Structures are given as structure tokens and as C-alpha cells.
Image (spheres, rainbow, N blue to C red):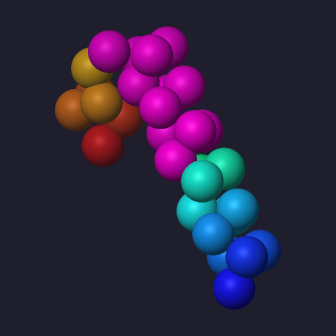
Amino acid sequence: MLALALLWGFLSILRWIEVRIDPFPVSRH
């Protein structure tokens, strides 16, 4: 399950970067 945890962390980092680039997630959703 380590791979799943790493994948989850990777997606979390991507989402964090997304929020940092676009401070208005409402416009994306």
C-alpha cells in the first residue's frame, strides 16, 4: 500500500501547486 500512499501524496502536492498558481479554484471547478 506504500505505492498508493505515495500516489496520494503526489496528487496532493499537484493540487497544492494548482491552488498556488490559481488562487481561485472556483473558476477551475
Q: Which residues are magenta?
A: 12-23
Residue 29 falls inside the magenta stretch: no
Quadrant assignment for the N terminus? bottom right
Task: Please tell me whether residue 23 is drawn above or below residue 14 in the rendered image.
Answer: above
Q: Residue at the far front: name it.
A: 2
Tell me the residue at 60%/53% (across/down).
Answer: 9
Looking at the magenta stretch, what is its main secondary structure?
A: helix
Q: Nearer the viewer, residue 13 or 18?
A: 13
Task: Please tell me whether residue 12 is drawn above or below residue 16 in the rendered image.
Answer: below
Q: Measured from the top left, where is residue 26 in percent x and y? A: 22, 32
Q: Measured from the top left, where is residue 2 in percent x and y? A: 73, 76
Q: Residue at the far bottom: name it.
A: 1
Tell me the residue at 45%/16% (across/down).
Answer: 20
Q: Residue at the far right: name it.
A: 3
**Quarter residue 3 falls in:** bottom right
Q: Measured from the top left, where is residue 22 in percent x and y? A: 41, 17
Task: Please tell me whether residue 18 is drawn above or below residue 20 in the rendered image.
Answer: below
Q: Residue at the far left: name it.
A: 26
Q: Nearer the viewer, residue 25 or 17?
A: 17
Q: Measured from the top left, where is residue 5 in percent x and y? A: 63, 69
Tell me the residue at 27%/20% (across/down).
Answer: 24
